[in-house]
Image (spheres, coloured by chain):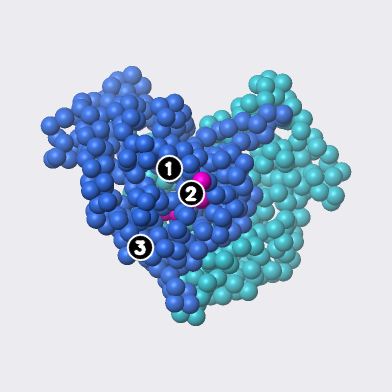
Chain colours: A cyan, B blue
Amino acid sequence: MINALVDRIKKMEAPIVVGLDPMLDYVPDYLLQNAIREQGETLEAAAEAVWQYNKGIVDAICDIVPAVKPQIAMYEQFGLPGLGVFKKTVDYCKKKGLVVIGDVKRGDIGSTSAAYAAGHIGKVKVGNKKLAAFDEDFITVNPYFGVDGIKPFVEVCKEEKKGLFILVKTSNPSSGEFQDQKINGKPLYELVGEQVVKWGEECMGDTYSYVGAVVGATYPEMGRIMRKVMPKTYILVPGYGAQGGTAKDLLPYFNEDGLGAIVNSSRGIIAAYKQPAYERFGETGFAEAARQAALDMKEDINSIF
Amino acid sequence: MINALVDRIKKMEAPIVVGLDPMLDYVPDYLLQNAIREQGETLEAAAEAVWQYNKGIVDAICDIVPAVKPQIAMYEQFGLPGLGVFKKTVDYCKKKGLVVIGDVKRGDIGSTSAAYAAGHIGKVKVGNKKLAAFDEDFITVNPYFGVDGIKPFVEVCKEEKKGLFILVKTSNPSSGEFQDQKINGKPLYELVGEQVVKWGEECMGDTYSYVGAVVGATYPEMGRIMRKVMPKTYILVPGYGAQGGTAKDLLPYFNEDGLGAIVNSSRGIIAAYKQPAYERFGETGFAEAARQAALDMKEDINSIF
């Protein structure tokens, strides 16, 4: 799957991923009101509004971006109806040719990680059948448990040719609280990055490993270091745009071939219609606004090379 | 909710929680075959078998243990039907008077943690209504993001009088890979524990904080230290039984009042019928075997005081 992702990034000349993180505040009010008219003020109505919103955005961007990253929390908060729309979104995006990165940040002891891996990127056995549940192409994984919490994900990646992005240095303001702590003079995130390299060596694609890393755009100096520590690791870079990362901050995350990193933007694209630069599209033009914002992001990022 | 948990632990004289981690290998084959006859080899059949299994166990133990801890991964692996049974299990356990600890180990940047918190222990707003999605009493949380990934969970705890158990030192063999790394001479898990204390000070119950910690039974020396570092923090202790922790390993996790810790056992109880000591119950007696194993665990643990 890493090969497919790299191919698509090259073909579209767009190292970008659109975060499908549909907070209800981003969803145009008319979509929510339509859904509430049909289903009342229910979790089902919220989920339906999210689905209509996602579908509009996906239709508008699927030919210009290589990948999407649905954040499962934004669906999980609406319970089962929300998770139903997560699954529907994953399926729809794949049908549209997009690579789907499930932003699930799971991680646990070995046997539990194995269940998460089976459910998200692998298959579970029921009787004699092997069945896929959520079936994303990549997922994000939390490394706090160490290698035996990671191995089951790596095993499933090998079997299914899927991929991971393991949290190394996250984009949030307090990420340093634990991740930057120095261990024999080296920050924890660097130690995690070194392990990501080791875990990834077992499952190499053509140029990059199936096992990628998350390093936030908000810490470009750390990006520079981690690029060197993890030369064959694809880096998923959150934090561009709304979280404060700018295009020129992104250069250190890329290799010299212009590959090696994929930059995420969520609200900067999906809620573009709420920003002054795109308000001309109006609420009903939310999807066209998202398309224009994605095109602008592509231009912005390509300007650094 | 921490007060309710402590009360129930005292009343039942049982500082134990039963992990409802229904791996399909634990589910008696006749339950799975019944479900497959009705629904074929599907995710729905697997979920139905898990539900029948859970219901049997919950009915058998609800009057002798204070709490259960469903591990969401074991449901999530069966996709939406599995998560439907997770929700049904949470509701059923609460109806039976059990305190429910959702073992979800979520954690992300602030806005995303807020969505997880709303969905699992809080409420989401849809129109003018506030709706609960999964509605567990407690959940487990991963600390890798630092304070701004934790705060939204703490805020919801305060509002809803719910609780957290934050991962400090996990029970798995490789937990030391990152958690034991020394920072200025102190292991990372101790640093996390100190923060748990700070986060927990904002929401104190009668004796203990709403914000608890996870410290594995497999590392009793670390349990001893963490008990001192976090005197008002309830400790959820996984790793007893199948993972290798014994009753005498558990004493350091408790305060002198015999409170302050709750010990989890999953397969040791729910799959007791597969163990030599309980095989007399047979496959159809899985629930009675679980009850007997819970009674034996209670006796074993109370023997240390």
Which of A71/B154 is in front?
B154
Q: Quadrant of residue A56?
A: top right
In magenta, the rendered stretch is: B206-214
Q: Chain of mark 3?
A: B
Circles 3 and 2: CB atoms closer than 8 Å = no
Residue with the most extreme bottom position? A185
The earlier-in-sequence mark between 1 and 2 is 1
Secondary-structure class at tag 1: helix
Which residue position holds label 1?
Answer: B6
Q: Amino acid at mark 3?
A: Arg
The earlier-in-sequence mark between 3 and 2 is 2
The reply, left or right, for residue B74 in relation to residue A236 is: left
Which residue position holds label 2?
Answer: B207
> Are the residues under marks 3 and 2 on the same chain?
yes
Q: Which mark is residue B277?
A: none
Q: Position of residue A10 (x, y in %)?
A: 60, 59
Q: Amino acid at mark 1?
A: Val
Q: Is residue B209 magenta?
A: yes
The earlier-in-sequence mark between 1 and 3 is 1
Q: Residue at x 30, y 44 (%)?
A: B265
Q: Position of residue A32 (x, y in %)?
A: 72, 30
For the residue carrying disc 1, how many other residues have a C-alpha within 10 Å: few (<14), some (14-19), or many (20+)?
A: many
For the residue carrying disc 3, how many other residues have a C-alpha within 10 Å: few (<14), some (14-19), or many (20+)?
A: some
Q: Quadrant of residue A247?
A: bottom right
Q: Residue at x 25, y 52 (%)?
A: B304
Circles 1 and 2: CB atoms closer than 8 Å = yes
Q: Is residue B180 magenta?
A: no
